[in-house]
Image (cartoon, helix red, strand yellow):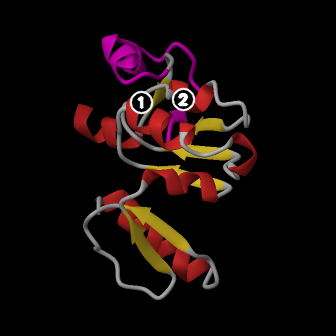
Amino acid sequence: GGKVGTAVCEMLVKARPNLKIRIFSRHQILKHPNISYSTDLKEIADYEVVLIGKILSGKMYRKALSDVPVDQVRTRVMYDYTVPVMPIEAVQKHPAGIKHVRVGVLKTTQQNNRFLKGYYDICMSHPQNHIVPCHFGCLL
């Protein structure tokens, strides 16, 4: 139900009309025949590609993935655009070899940019000379 997630889903259904999207949420924001909703996080194991846009506790991921036999986990990659992105131990250590990939971080070509150095790099969980676009707006 967030602004970015809504925009991503709307763009995906236009660009790929046959794509099926399953959203983990109690609130049904988007009405589309290819978009459905679930409150069962275990269903992430049914999808090869998962997009994460909301910070959930590691405990929730651990429970969801541990309840599914390893040979039945289809998930291969989780793209994560949360800010800040948090390591998900249950994903990183999962025997199925799920990749947790952070998306939406921009890197400047100008190294040692004074503007992109500071304590906020650490709190936003990205390296020096990188910035999350929405964080850039906050800094301005």
Q: Are marks 1 and 2 in contact (CB under 8 Å)?
A: yes
| Residue 125 in the image, given as x and y percentages of width and height | 43, 22
What residue is drawn where x is 40% and y is 42%?
133
Q: Is residue 127 magenta?
A: no
Q: Secondary structure at mark 1?
A: helix
Q: Is residue 64 above or below residue 26?
A: above
In the displayed structure image, the side of residue 59 where residue 128 appears, left or right: right
In the displayed structure image, the side of residue 42 where residue 16 appears, left or right: right
> 81 or 54, which lies in front?
54
Q: Determine if residue 102 is in view.
A: no
Residue behind mark 2: 90
Viewport quadrant of the N terminus: bottom left
Q: CA distance from mark 1 to mark 2?
A: 7 Å
In the rendered structure, which amino acid carries the disc numbered 2? Ala
Q: Secondary structure at mark 2?
A: helix
Q: Which residues lie in the magenta part?
A: 104-126
Q: Tell me the crowding category of disc 2: few under 14, some 14 to 19, or many 20 or more residues within 10 angstroms, Cα based.
A: some
What residue is drawn where x is 51% and y is 82%?
34
> 78 or 7, which lies in front?
78
> 10 or 130, which lies in front?
10
What residue is drawn where x is 52% and y is 71%?
21
Q: Is residue 118 magenta?
A: yes
In the rendered structure, which amino acid carries the disc numbered 1? Gly
> 48 or 53, which lies in front?
48
| Residue 63 in the image, given as x and y percentages of width and height | 46, 37
Q: Is residue 65 above or below residue 24?
A: above
Label drawn at residue 58: 1
Q: Determine if residue 133 is in view.
A: yes
| Residue 54 in the image, given as x and y percentages of width and height | 35, 46
Q: Is residue 97 above or below residue 125?
A: below
In the displayed structure image, the side of residue 16 where residue 106 appears, left or right: left
What residue is drawn where x is 73% and y is 34%?
97
